[in-house]
Amino acid sequence: MSTDMALGADLFAELAVTKPEGDWQQLALCAESDPELFYPEARESAPEAKAICMGCEVRVQCLAAAIVAREPHGIWGGLTYHERLNLTRDLRRAGYTEPQRRGRRVA
């Protein structure tokens, strides 16, 4: 398993037990930032938005919410839509399951 995959596996293991519930959005650092940072033009990687996400205490909840909702736009939990698709595909192949929606609607 590559280093990137190992890091992804750790993240996905955490995602598998994370339920995107509650008021996590109120704790998100992006709420204090310019929203346009998190919605880059096509093919842009949005490094500034990703850096904000990496320091956010609710990054995993955010990422789980985007995966559960199949959010097609923006940076969520530090990943673009295509990065989220790749993460879920690769880790599903490794035997992990995706976070599931519980309770009220997320995102």
Image (cartoon, rainbow, N blue to C red):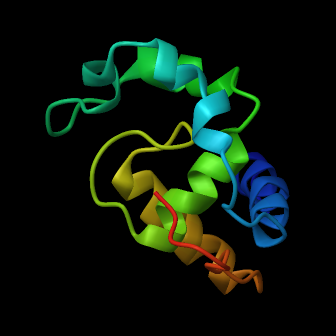
Residue at (75%, 63%) from the top-left corner?
Answer: 15
Residue 85: percent from left, percent from top: 44, 66
Residue furthest to the left in view is 41
Task: From the viewer's side, name the closer residue of 35 and 6.
Answer: 35
In this rendering, the answer to whether 9 lies above or below 56 is: below
- Quadrant in which the N terminus appears: bottom right
Task: From the viewer's side, name the closer residue of 77 and 3.
Answer: 77
Q: Is residue 80 left or right of residue 89?
A: left
Residue 105: percent from left, percent from top: 50, 71
In this rendering, the answer to whether 52 lies above or below 27 is: above
Residue 29: percent from left, percent from top: 59, 21
How many numbered circles does the render carry? 0
In this rendering, the answer to whether 66 lies above or below 51 is: below
Task: From the viewer's side, name the closer residue of 4 and 18.
Answer: 18
Residue at (66%, 26%) from the top-left corner?
Answer: 54
Residue at (77%, 54%) from the top-left corner?
Answer: 11
Q: Is residue 76 left or right of residue 91?
A: left
Task: From the viewer's side, name the closer residue of 65 and 87.
Answer: 65
Residue at (60%, 32%) from the top-left corner?
Answer: 26
